[in-house]
Image (tube, rainbow, N blue to C red):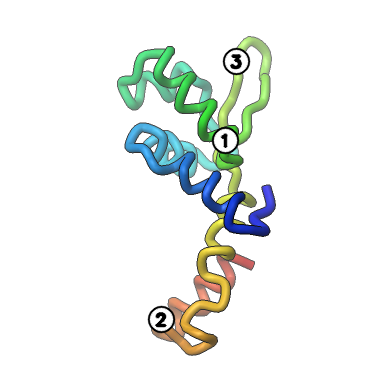
Amino acid sequence: MEIKDTLSAVSALSALAQDHRLAIFRLLVQAGSSGLPAGRIAEMLDLPASSLSFHLSHLKNGGMIRDEREGRSIIYRADFDAMNALMAFLLENCCAGEACLPGSQQEALKETIS
């Protein structure tokens, strides 16, 4: 997902703007590139399957997660490219070009979003 405009940023942010969806996304970020099957996500967050399906759909439509069938399971993964694109969009032209973070933190942030 590429964040080019306010509308796509709002879509991504609205996908994350709910406590269960944010918890799911953070869990998938922690899981890294291996991702997690829906059943494991439901178990870890104590969510009923119907609620989980609803929230996964919102996250996928907002471009923040991807899914991939592996055998009988669907594995969900955070879309790190989309997350980085959203952060880059939000921080574009940060602080009018001035250093707004201590040097090492600013360099780390630049590396993360580039």
Element assignment for label 2: loop
Could you classify mark 3 by the number of other residues whose Cα lies within 10 Å: few (under 14), some (14-19), or many (20 or more)? few
Q: Which mark is residue 73?
A: 3
**Callout 1: helix, strand or loop?**
strand
Tell me residue 90's x, y (percent). Answer: 52, 64
Image coordinates for residue 36, horizontal then vertical, percent: 51, 28
Q: Which residue is mark 2?
A: 101
Residue identified by numbered label 1: 77
Q: Observer-nearest residue: 37 or 89?
A: 89
Mark 3–mark 2 contact, CB under 8 Å? Answer: no
Looking at marks 2 and 1 on the same chain, the residue that comes earlier in the sequence is marked by 1
Q: Amino acid at mark 3?
A: Ser
Residue sitting at x 63%, y 28%:
67
Q: How many marks?
A: 3
Mark 2 is surrounded, within 10 Å at the Cα level, by few (under 14), some (14 to 19) or many (20 or more) other residues, namely few
Label 3, secondary structure: give it: strand
Picture quadrant where residue 89 is located: bottom right
Q: Position of residue 51 (x, y in %)?
A: 40, 18
Disc 1 crowd, CA 10 A, few/some/many (<14, 14-19, 20+): many
Residue placed furthest toward the bottom: 98
Q: Residue type at mark 2: give it.
A: Leu
> For the residues carrying marks 3 and 2, which lies nearer the camera in this image?
2
Please indicate whether residue 5 sits to the left or right of residue 14 in the image: right
Query: Distance from label 3 to label 1 (Cα)?
Result: 13 Å
Residue located at (67% from left, 13% from top): 71
Query: Measuring 64% from the left and 58% from the top, which residue is drawn there?
Result: 5
Decide if residue 28 is on the left or right side of residue 72: left
Q: Position of residue 68 (x, y in %)?
A: 67, 26
**Residue 16 vertical placement versus 36 (above, below):** below
Q: Quadrant of the C terminus?
A: bottom right
Instruction: Name which residue type carries label 1.
Output: Arg
